[in-house]
Image (cartoon, rainbow, N blue to C red):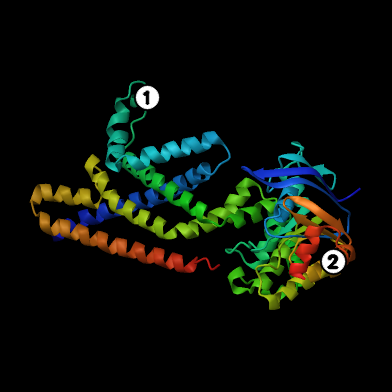
Amino acid sequence: MPMLAMSGVRKAFGTNVVLKDINLAVDPGEVCCIIGPSGSGKSTVLRCINRLVTIDAGDVVIDGLSVIDPAVKDVDLRRRVGMVFQQFNLFPHMTALENVTLAPRKVRGLSADAANALGVTLLEKVGLREKAQSYPAQLSGGQQQRVAIARALAMEPKVMLFDEATSALDPEITGEVLAVMKALASEHTTMICVTHEMGFAREVGTHVVFMDGGLIVEEGPPHAIFDAPQAERTQAFLSKVL
Amino acid sequence: MRDAAPQLAHGFVLTLQIAFFGVIGALAVGVIGAAMRVSTSRAARVAATAFTEFFRNTPPLVQIYFLAFAIPKIPGIGPHLILPSIVAATLGLVLHQGAINIEILRAGLGAVPAGQREAAQALGLSRIDELRSVLVPQAVRISLPALGNNVISLFKNTTLVASIGVLDIFGEANDIIATILVSAELFLTVGVVYVICVALLGALFRALERKFALAR
């Protein structure tokens, strides 16, 4: 059974139809990279998965739970899905450790000690143990994004969503964030990454999806998409970005 | 003048008490009302909006008079609900300045970047935790300068309580003037006391703003 299955997903904001008919399956351990031009609906696909956006038609089933099932609570879905944002969205009034331990304490009900132990382990994992007591403003962009990854991992999610996680970073520091993402992929974390990093998609992705105009135009293994794209729009897009 | 000092000091203590309970009460009204203004429940939003519009848009003196003099006259409830003057006076200030705090905090909540809410939701936080742990702490920091102004406004508006016979520092001054007829020195003294207190409050809020400054 796939970890994530989207079928016939449609979403409009007012008269603007952002997703027309999205069908996508992601198996456990896969690293699915969604590429495509701005405004093609990539970020909206991610937001449908954890109900940050409610879909108009179709279904999204994540680890057996359907987003359109009213009996499935928001928290049930969101505990299974970690999300990393383009702008990091760390809580500026909390230290790095407090950012990471908030959800374990409030949502998973861990004690302060257990949450702190988990938080330190996760900050260690992203190489920022010594920054536990720093506030976001005292960290570089790359460090902030690594804290945000640790914060999402603290829910021990089944799937990690990355929404252009490196787009707000200076080119010379995207590497440190990509390295953390690569390490997660090597541990067989199921990941769905909206990305403009074609190198990452080709090297780390197991499944590449090209989206345009609210539709999946083409998908397949990285070598098929990057080396032998079939659709004209995929070819045109790749010729511009590669 | 020297004979007036103990009486003014007595009044000043009362002024501080009214201001203290007024500020705490108005802050509580502000936090609860602002949370209702952004609630998912339509009834809660409507109730909080109606409260804000009514108590912000009526003069605090009218509210204090109403609580002190009108409520006891309402058939049925009046005789059972006679508020002591000091309670009516403090409550009037709490309602008026609280309604203003609701507006201040609502605007502060609106100024917290949308990504903060998304991040809180994506982590699975409940609406209450999202407000309590993520949005309100940031909204309060954003709102600190405006909240400070409202505290200062409340402090000065405590003089309104004298008009229903509560002997705050201003009430005591009026009382003394009625017997010894030296108004200039007494009003000047009262004015200086307010200037000093407000300057101290201003300094306190500037210190709070520095301490809780939100670097982004």
Question: Hey, which residue is sitting farthest right in the picture?
Answer: A1
- Residues B14 and A43: in front is A43
* Apparent side of residue B47 relative to residue B185 in the rendered image (left or right): right
Q: Is residue B91 visible?
A: no
Look at the numbered disc 2 and give the secondary structure of its residue.
Answer: helix
The image position of residue A13, as x and y in percent, is 63, 45
Q: Amino acid at mark 2?
A: Phe
Q: Amino acid at mark 1?
A: Ile
Q: Quadrant of residue A8?
A: top right
* Apparent side of residue A15 relative to residue B207 in the rendered image (left or right): right
Residue identifier under label 1? B77
- Residues B39 and B196: in front is B39
Relative to B96, residue A113 above or below: below
Q: Read off the chain for label 1.
A: B
The image position of residue B32, as x and y in percent, is 50, 44
Tell me the mark number nearer the camera, choosing from 2 and 1. 2
Please give the name of the residue rendered at 30% of the width and 52% of the height, measured from the top-left corner: B15
- Residues B32 and A117: in front is B32
Residue identifier under label 2? A226
| Callout 2 touching callout 1 (CB < 8 Å) | no
Instruction: Tell me the CA gap for discs 2 and 1.
Output: 79 Å
Q: Are marks 2 and 1 on the same chain?
A: no
Please give the name of the residue rendered at 37% of the width and 48% of the height, measured from the top-left corner: B22
Q: Which mark is residue A85?
A: none
Point out the image quarter for the C terminus of chain A: bottom right
The image position of residue A118, as x and y in percent, is 76, 63
Question: Hey, which residue is sitting farthest bottom in the picture?
Answer: A172
* Apparent side of residue B65 relative to residue A126 in the rendered image (left or right): left
